[in-house]
Every structure is written in structure tokens, then in C-alpha cells.
Image (spheres, rainbow, N blue to C red):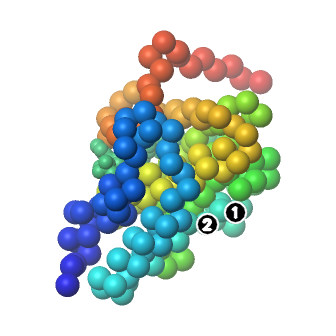
Amino acid sequence: MATVSDLTQRRCYSPAALGIAPTSPSANRHFSVAATNDILQHCAAKLSSANGTMTLDIRVFEPEHHAQARGLWESTEGVGLSEADSFENMRRFLERNPGLSFVATDKQLIVATILCGHDGRRGLIHHLAVASSHRRRGLGRALVRRALSALHQEGIQKCHLLVFNGNVSGRAFWDRIGAEERTALGIFSLLT
Ligand SMILES: CC(C)(COP(=O)(O)OP(=O)(O)OC[C@H]1O[C@@H](n2cnc3c(N)ncnc32)[C@H](O)[C@@H]1OP(=O)(O)O)[C@@H](O)C(=O)NCCC(=O)NCCS
């Protein structure tokens, strides 16, 4: 029987492993979002049958997830925190962008997050974080797909994301899942 380690090395629920990978780089850029639930269920089943200990689930990010999520962000490299991440500000963000942000849980413990919102024109992703114990199994990709699918259903055609220049592995992830780096654009910020 396959072990969890075997499954991890095969990245059990990557679309490629399940035979539903995009057929071209351009297809990859536009994410076939519909299959995400199937991917997740397939993966959870595989991991559960391997040792009966891992039960993955993706659900909408609710305010009560804040404390656990914050703990994950604080221990995750590449995640920048500010006053925008307080409970009250996060509650407001979630209320303003319902059903666009997600957590992944393993036995009720939050092991990954994605925050996503939009301004009526473009989406923006923040705080994609996967616990180091759960990386390279397709969770990051699955969360991105869920967020993009939710944006698409709201009529939003494009989503941006911010990543620190020095975050080499984060940049490699975005590149790998087909995100386009906008080298002609920079980010400027002003206080309100
Ligand atoms: C970046 C991060 C979210 C990736 O999560 P993950 O669940 O391990 O990613 P996945 O398993 O879904 O990987 C999707 C693809 O990206 C590739 N990938 C993931 N991490 C990678 C890395 N560090 N370097 C190169 N490729 C990587 C995977 O191999 C996979 O490719 P494949 O399916 O074609 O084989 C996770 O490493 C993390 O939380 N990092 C710290 C926080 C961070 O940097 N967030 C993103 C920047 S905002």
C-alpha cells in the first residue's frame, strides 16, 4: 500500500497526477476551475486511505477562523502582516467580500489560507499560505482555483496578487501555476 510519503512525492492531487491538467500553457493561465472539488475529494480520499490520519477540507473563510489563520501567517515566511490583519479589519474584509476567501483544514486545524477580494473590476489575492507540513500536495493550487472560481462567478475577469521580490519560492509557485509577472507595472502606495 502507498504511504503518505509516497503520495506526497507524487503530489497526489495535482491535476497532472489526476489526468486533468491543462493541455497548454495558455490553458494553464486561465485555470480550469471546475475540477477543484473533485481534486480535493480525490486527494483527501487517497491520503485517508493511506494512513487514516489526514482529512482535508476547503471551506469559506469565516471571522472565527481568524485566530488560527493569524497563527499560521505569523509562522509563514513571505507573509507580511499589518493592522489590516486585526480581527475587526479582517471581519470587515470578509463581510465586504463574501465567499471569496478560503481556509483548508486537516482535522479541524487550519493548514492553509487564501484571502481574496475585488473592487468591482479586478480581484486581489492576499495571504496564500500553506503550512510547511502540507506543502507540495496541490493545496496552494486548489485554494487559488477556488478563489478564482468565486471571482469568475462574480463577473471578475482578472485577479492580481502581491509577492515580495525576495520570496523566491513563492514566485516560483506563481510562475508554476501560470500567473503572469507584470514587469511593466510597479506598485505605489499612499496612506489615507
Ligand atoms: C507558495 C505556497 C503557497 C505553495 O503551496 P503548495 O501547496 O506547496 O503548492 P502546490 O502543491 O499547490 O504546488 C503547485 C505547483 O507549484 C509548484 N511549487 C510549489 N512550491 C514551489 C516552490 N517552492 N518552488 C517551485 N515550484 C513550486 C509545485 O511543484 C506544483 O507544481 P506541479 O503541480 O506542476 O508539480 C507555499 O509554499 C507557502 O505557503 N509558502 C509560504 C508563503 C508564500 O510564499 N505564499 C505565496 C506568496 S504570496
- Relative side of 68 to 41, left or right: right
| Quadrant position of the C terminus in the picture | top right
Residue 59's disc is: 2
Determine whether the residue tagged by mark 1 lies in a helix, strand or loop: loop
- 155 or 83, which lies in front? 155
Q: Residue 56: image x %, image y %?
A: 47, 73
Circle 2 residues within 10 Å: few <14, some 14–19, many ≥20: some
Q: Residue 188: image x %, image y %?
A: 60, 17
Camera-near label (1 vs 2) is: 2
- Extreme residue in the front direction: 23
Residue, x 52% and y 54% (percent of image)?
143
In this rendering, the answer to whether 123 lies above or below 16 is above
- 144 or 91, which lies in front? 144
Determine whether the residue tagged by mark 2 lies in a helix, strand or loop: strand
Residue 58 visible? The answer is: yes
Toward which corner of the image does residue 131 lie, by quadrant?
bottom left
Residue, x 66% and y 44% (percent of image)?
152
- Relative side of 59 to 52, left or right: right
Q: Amino acid at mark 2?
A: Arg
Q: Are marks 1 and 2 in contact (CB under 8 Å)?
A: yes
Residue, x 35% and y 63% (percent of image)?
18
Q: Residue 73: image x %, image y %?
A: 50, 52
| Quadrant position of the N terminus in the picture | bottom left
C-alpha gap between disc 1 and disc 2: 9 Å
In this rendering, the answer to whether 148 lies above or below 133 is above
Q: Amino acid at mark 1?
A: Glu
Circle 1 is placed at which residue position?
62
- Relative side of 85 to 47, left or right: right
Toward which corner of the image does residue 43 lie, by quadrant?
bottom left
Residue, x 34% and y 59% (percent of image)?
19
